[in-house]
Amino acid sequence: MGGWLYFRYKVTKGENPEIFSDLESKIGKYHRVMLYLVILLPIMLLLMNNTSSVDGYGLFSMILKGFSALLMLLYAFGMIQLFIRINKLKKTN
């Protein structure tokens, strides 16, 4: 229907079915997610630069800087985890 494919799969309790079940498609999925994150990196860096240039030492300024630093840490953690997963899948292949 309109280029979309719908699958049905009977799931037993405790089972977690995946569409990407073979190694190549899992690696491809993680590569696509990493590509999206790399594309968003300049935007994240721009936002980080803009929040660091906020003048003043008020509460709002400190919260904004802390929040942007936390977002960058989570972003970096996600990228590292994706890289580790891709390497593990490549080693099992």
Image (cartoon, rainbow, N blue to C red):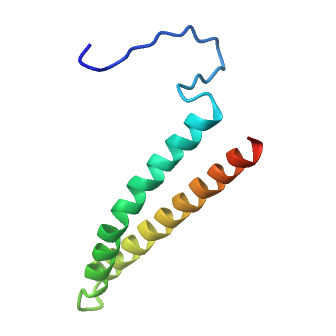
Q: Does residue 93 appear to the left or right of 54 in the view shown?
A: right
Q: Is residue 14 above or below residue 36?
A: above
Viewer-side residue, 76 vs 5: 5
Q: Quadrant of the C terminus?
A: top right
Q: Is residue 47 above or below residue 28?
A: below
Q: Is residue 16 above or below residue 6?
A: below
Residue reaching furthest to the bottom: 56
Q: Residue at x 53, y 10 (%)?
A: 9
Residue 62 image point, x, y percent: 34, 82
Q: Does residue 72 appear to the left or right of 12 in the view shown?
A: left
Q: Does residue 73 appear to the left or right of 6 in the view shown?
A: right
Dividing the picture into quarters, in which one does residue 6 lie?
top left
Dividing the picture into quarters, in which one does residue 59 lie?
bottom left
Q: Quadrant of the N terminus?
A: top left
Viewer-side residue, 54 vs 34: 34
Q: Residue at x 50, y 41 (%)?
A: 29
Residue 80 image point, x, y percent: 58, 62
Q: Residue at x 35, y 79 (%)?
A: 65
Residue 17 image point, x, y percent: 59, 22
Residue 39 image point, x, y percent: 35, 60
Q: Does residue 88 appear to the left or right of 37 in the view shown?
A: right
Viewer-side residue, 50 vs 31: 31
